[in-house]
Image (cartoon, coloured by chain):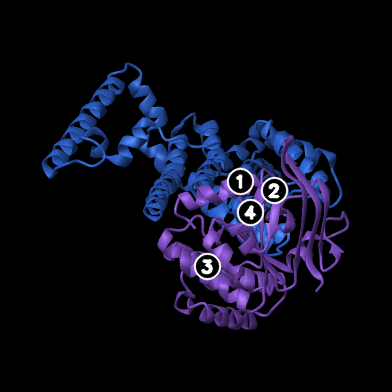
């Protein structure tokens, strides 16, 4: 669910500094030397991997099946139009998730015996959903609910696929919000209550605004995750990007569509991941500046 | 004069440890009562009990003759009548000074934005902070933050003010400006219950001083009596240490 940055990620992000003399090179020459080492080692590493793969006996066959330029040209428009559906699913789902998860988290944060049933319900929902693999949830809702043929309930695979994503991600995201709410100092809650604000007002005006600021990096991480996981609804037959690649493969026995889909997902998710890191770094620096 | 605040036989334990025992204390209208005693003697807990932030285990607390510790009392309504200021300022860091002050009046007391802001400006003017009106708390000094916290509590027009060691977290040179604010409130007749380590201040400003020791009020009386002629051995010992430290 969460995107952990790999050591390679770290090198890409910090660039030469990580390979050089440390995070803050003492002199410009040392920095330049570090950069040089970084460039050379990257080239050497890439060359080794490339030679290793290209000299494999089966590479020509793999190249034809996965990296065929003509197949790419043919399949790309189809995958792209499917991918647009992925993007739309992502946007609709994300908005719903952010709102619903906040609601669930606020319910969990309410105190006092009067709210116990609501709290228990929220905990039950979170535990239940987090305990089921997301793919299973998609299958269960996507095939199960339409089979019930309920009156007045949509039967579309797209609808239930997105609903499953929303249900699943809302549970995780609610926990992110909750961590944020709990990270706000107890004295803030006490101050707000002492002014006569009710629990809900305290959450709304004092705790949640501070909580959200604390968890924006974690929420952005969830964005990256969901942006890829929308592709899981292909299993219901929804014609999104991966499904288009799948159809192309079934017709031509060529896998290049997968590569086309991967490229499209990367084009969207890498910038978001970089932005997340940039934002997290900036936020940390700001906090350090503030506390010093 | 009728008692504004009446604390009767109040007891409180945390995890089996008794932090308040048989507390009897009343504060009359316009009276200023200072709670003194070493850290951990129960001063802060007592104030939080009065504000209903900490539920009491035994006894009762009444405001204007009506019990506020009963089961049917809405704590939000009770808190509207009193203000509390804490040691650590606790301003809301994501709001500027003006919004910090107007939050209570607007959301709790239903004042319109314009009226709430006008009143806030009047208070800020009175306490010499009007040029900070749009600043965020992290731009203010500790003393300024604490004065804003006092104003925030006053903005709800409380009938009783509680102060919980509000100068303990301040740099020494900032203490005076905050204490002056309380002196100003005394001159206007505000009823106040003040936990403090500033003995000189307590002597000046208090109508009555209560010495708390280990969760019990050991003695109370006029500041002159307590500070010059304490009866209990623990009070003498406590004051002697303060004098030795050059704080009185």
Which residue is disc 4 drawn over?
B230
Which residue is disc 2 drawn over?
A109
Quadrant of the rendered image containing residue A176: top right
Q: Is label 4 in a helix, a strand or a loop?
A: loop
| Residue A182, label in figure | 1
Percent coordinates x, y for residue B71 in the rendering = 87, 54
Q: Are marks 2 and 4 on the same chain?
A: no
Could you tell me which residue is drawn at 71 percent across and 34 percent down?
A: A127
| Residue B179, label in figure | 3
Q: Is residue B156 left or right of residue B4?
A: left
Which tag is nearer the camera, tag 3 or tag 4? Answer: 4
Within 10 Å of disc 4 (Cα), the crowding (few <14, some 14-19, many 20+) is some
Q: Is label 1 in a helix, a strand or a loop?
A: helix
Percent coordinates x, y for residue A237 in the rendering = 64, 39
Q: Chain of mark 3?
A: B
Please say if B217 is above or below B122.
above
Residue at the extreme left of the image, as rendered: A29
Q: Chain of mark 2?
A: A
Query: Chain A colour?
Result: blue
Cα–Cα gap, marks 1 and 3: 33 Å
Percent coordinates x, y for residue A220 in the rendering = 50, 48
Could you tell me which residue is drawn at 27 percent across and 26 percent down?
A: A50
Do the CB atoms of the residues marked 2 and 1 lie less than 8 Å apart? yes
Q: Chain of mark 4?
A: B
Query: Chain B colour?
Result: purple
């Amino acid at each position: 669910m969460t995107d952990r940055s790999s050591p390679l990620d770290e090198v890409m992000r910090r660039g030469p500094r990580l390979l050089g003399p440390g995070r803050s090179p003492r002199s410009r020459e040392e920095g330049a030397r570090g950069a040089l080492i970084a460039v050379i080692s990257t080239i050497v590493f890439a060359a080794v991997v490339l030679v290793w793969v290209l000299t494999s006996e089966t590479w020509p066959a793999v190249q034809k099946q996965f990296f065929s330029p003509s197949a790419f040209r043919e399949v790309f428009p189809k995958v792209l139009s499917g991918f647009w559906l992925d993007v739309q699913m992502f946007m609709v789902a994300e908005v719903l998730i952010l709102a619903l998860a906040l609601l669930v988290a606020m319910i969990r944060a309410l105190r006092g015996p009067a709210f116990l049933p609501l709290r228990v319900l929220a905990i039950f929902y979170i535990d239940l959903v987090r305990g089921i693999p997301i793919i299973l949830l998609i299958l269960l809702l996507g095939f199960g609910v339409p089979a019930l043929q309920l009156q007045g309930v949509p039967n579309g695979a797209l609808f239930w696929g997105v609903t499953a994503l929303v249900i699943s991600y809302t549970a995780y995201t609610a926990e992110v919000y909750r961590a944020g709410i709990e990270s706000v100092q107890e004295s803030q809650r006490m101050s707000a209550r002492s002014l006569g604000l009710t629990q809900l007002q305290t959450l709304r005006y004092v705790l949640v605004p501070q909580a959200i600021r604390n968890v924006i990096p974690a929420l952005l991480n969830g964005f990256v995750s969901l942006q890829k996981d929308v592709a899981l609804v292909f299993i219901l037959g929804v014609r999104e990007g991966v499904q288009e690649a799948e159809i192309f493969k079934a017709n031509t026995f060529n896998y290049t569509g997968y590569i086309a889909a991967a490229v499209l997902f990367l084009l969207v998710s890498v910038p978001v991941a970089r932005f997340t890191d940039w934002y997290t770094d900036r936020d940390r620096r700001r906090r350090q500046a503030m506390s010093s | 004069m009728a008692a504004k605040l009446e604390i009767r036989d109040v007891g409180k334990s945390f995890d089996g440890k008794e932090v308040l025992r048989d507390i009897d204390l009343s504060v009359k209208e316009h009276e200023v009562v200072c709670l003194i005693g070493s850290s951990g003697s129960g001063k802060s807990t007592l104030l939080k009990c009065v504000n209903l932030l900490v539920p009491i285990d035994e006894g009762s607390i009444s405001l204007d003759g009506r019990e506020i510790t009963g089961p049917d009392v809405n704590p939000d309504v009770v808190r509207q009548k009193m203000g509390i200021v804490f040691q650590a300022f606790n301003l809301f860091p994501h709001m500027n000074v003006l919004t910090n002050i107007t939050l209570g009046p607007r959301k709790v007391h239903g004042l319109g934005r314009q009226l709430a802001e006008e009143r806030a400006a009047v208070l800020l003017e009175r306490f010499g902070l009007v040029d900070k009106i749009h600043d965020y708390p992290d731009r203010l000094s500790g003393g300024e933050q604490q004065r804003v916290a006092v104003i925030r509590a006053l903005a709800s027009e409380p009938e009783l003010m509680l102060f919980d060691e509000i100068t303990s977290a301040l740099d020494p040179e900032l203490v005076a400006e905050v204490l002056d604010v309380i002196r100003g409130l005394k001159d206007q007749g505000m009823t106040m219950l003040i936990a403090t380590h500033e003995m000189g201040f307590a002597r000046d400003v208090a109508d009555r001083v209560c010495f708390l020791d280990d969760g019990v009020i050991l003695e109370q009386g006029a500041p002159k009596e307590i500070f010059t002629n304490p009866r209990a051995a623990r009070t003498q010992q406590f004051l002697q240490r303060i004098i030795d430290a050059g704080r009185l």
